[in-house]
């Protein structure tokens, strides 16, 4: 064995020993749990004797509750309902949603008063269906609703847990119910917000979305006093989803439709983001960016409403950063100003992205058409060969 082989053998033995040690440590950890090595005390670190009149608890005693009980999570007090209504009414657009939410607040308020006076009350479901295109504020309103419900005393925590199909459905039999139950457990005391909920209602034989729906419906019944579920998605698809199951129809009877933002409202959203970030549009930039939003909003679904405005805002910041990076002396005003050059650069970058996306979609469509044609030809070829063979046999 030459020197090279000896070195390789030594390295192999060393690696093997490290793996063995690591595996032994893993086995010990699995059996006994993780262990923390005890560091030796220094000679001069003798424990201090507590004074007779010293009643201050040690840090460990302060951290651990009496009786070895786990420390309770600190809950924030309910917010003032008038402050929440003011926050709602100050939002840009969403006029129909604001009216429905205010109606719901009044209904819940009177419902609670009737119960306090021992008057009869009609069963009221707080679960809701949000319909509308992406970027119209559905998640924002769901988060606000969780706080409103807590303020009204209908929920104990008032937090929001947001999921989609992937957060509820597993890939194997029996796992979806466990996965969905875990999400529901996290949402207890608050709002469970399921975006694109119609994706749960798949017609595939090997799909477990129905298992998630069944688990969800049971939880809504078992925890109806401290759990609100809000499902959201496109109008028509959500209608089909709710009416596909009698259990869903009986539990979801409140619909909030989110209209698309107008160009003026989207400009207002951009102004809020600029103000929050300490940016200012020049006069010409304001004209150009309004035209930019108008042009980009040719399709509300593709543009994404408020989401599209946020994308434009981020592109403006990138364009400004690229411009200022070339300057030697940058002032505070320069750092705040968004110019027409920034708008033009952002729009050019956006158009380049859109062109690339159109090319990708065209390639996908062309590939699908080619595959469909090949499948058609593959079906016809055997039939043609059999016909030719029969004809030749008949001629003979």
Image: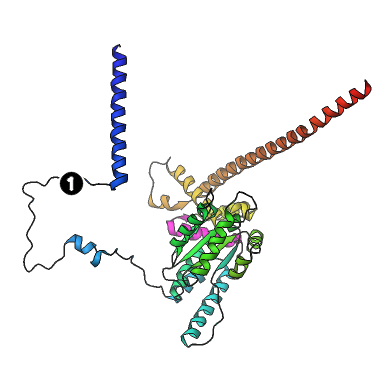
Q: Is residue 238 left or right of residue 164?
A: right
Q: Is residue 135 visible?
A: no
Q: Is residue 291 left or right of residue 219?
A: right
Circle 1 residues within 10 Å: few <14, some 14–19, many ≥20: few
Q: Nearer the viewer, residue 157 or 141?
A: 157
User: Badge 1 is on which residue?
Assistant: 38
Which stretch appears magenta? 258-280
> Please, is residue 57 above or below residue 313 in the view?
below
The residue that appears at 57% across and 60% down in the rendered structure is 213
Q: Position of residue 167 (x, y in %)?
A: 50, 53
Quarter residue 58 falls in: bottom left
Q: Position of residue 20 (x, y in %)?
A: 30, 32
Q: Nearer the viewer, residue 115 or 13?
A: 13
Q: Is residue 161 left or right of residue 130?
A: left
Q: Nearer the viewer, residue 90 or 204?
A: 204
Question: Is residue 389 in the magenta section?
Answer: no
Describe the colour scheme in one phrase. rainbow
Which type of secondary structure does the marked residue at label 1 adopt? loop
Q: Is residue 24 visible?
A: yes
Quarter of the C terminus within the rendering: top right
Q: Position of residue 392 (x, y in %)?
A: 89, 23
Q: Position of residue 389 (x, y in %)?
A: 86, 25
Question: Is residue 275 in the magenta section?
Answer: yes
Quarter residue 321 falls in: top left
């Amino acid at each position: 064995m030459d020197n090279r082989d000896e070195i390789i053998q030594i390295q192999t033995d060393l690696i093997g020993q490290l793996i063995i040690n690591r595996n032994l440590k893993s086995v010990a950890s699995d059996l006994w749990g993780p262990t923390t090595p005890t560091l030796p005390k220094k000679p001069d670190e003798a424990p201090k004797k507590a004074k007779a009149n010293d009643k201050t608890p040690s840090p460990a005693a302060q951290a651990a509750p009496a009786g070895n009980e786990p420390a309770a999570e600190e809950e924030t007090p309910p917010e003032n309902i008038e402050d929440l209504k003011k926050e709602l009414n100050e939002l840009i657009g969403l006029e129909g949603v604001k009216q429905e939410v205010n109606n719901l607040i009044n209904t819940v308020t009177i419902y609670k008063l009737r119960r306090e006076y021992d008057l009869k009350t009609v069963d009221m479901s707080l679960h809701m269906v949000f319909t509308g295109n992406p970027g119209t504020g559905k998640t924002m309103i769901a988060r606000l609703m969780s706080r409103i419900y807590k303020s009204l005393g209908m929920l104990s925590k008032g937090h929001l847990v947001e999921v989609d199909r992937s957060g509820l459905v597993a890939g194997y039999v029996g796992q979806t119910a466990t996965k969905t139950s875990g999400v529901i457990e996290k949402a207890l005391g608050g709002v469970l917000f399921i975006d694109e909920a119609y994706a749960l209602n798949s017609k595939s034989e090997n799909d477990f979305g129905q298992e998630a729906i069944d688990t969800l419906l049971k939880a809504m019944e078992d925890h109806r006093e401290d759990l609100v579920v809000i499902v959201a998605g496109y109008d028509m698809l959500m209608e089909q989803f709710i009416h596909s199951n009698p259990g869903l129809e009986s539990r979801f009877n409140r619909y909030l439709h989110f209209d698309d933002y107008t160009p003026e409202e989207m400009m207002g959203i951009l102004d809020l983001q600029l103000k929050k970030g300490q940016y200012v549009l020049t006069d010409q930039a304001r004209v150009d960016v309004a035209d930019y939003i108008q042009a980009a909003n040719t399709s509300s679904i593709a543009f994404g409403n408020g989401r599209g405005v946020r994308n434009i805002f981020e592109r403006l910041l990138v364009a400004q950063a690229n411009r200022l990076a070339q300057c030697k002396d940058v002032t505070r005003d320069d750092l705040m100003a968004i110019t027409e050059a920034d708008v033009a650069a952002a729009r050019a970058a956006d158009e380049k992205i859109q062109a690339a996306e159109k090319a990708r979609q065209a390639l996908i469509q062309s590939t699908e058409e080619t595959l469909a044609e090949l499948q058609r030809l593959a079906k016809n070829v055997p039939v043609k060969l059999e016909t030719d063979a029969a004809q030749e046999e008949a001629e003979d």
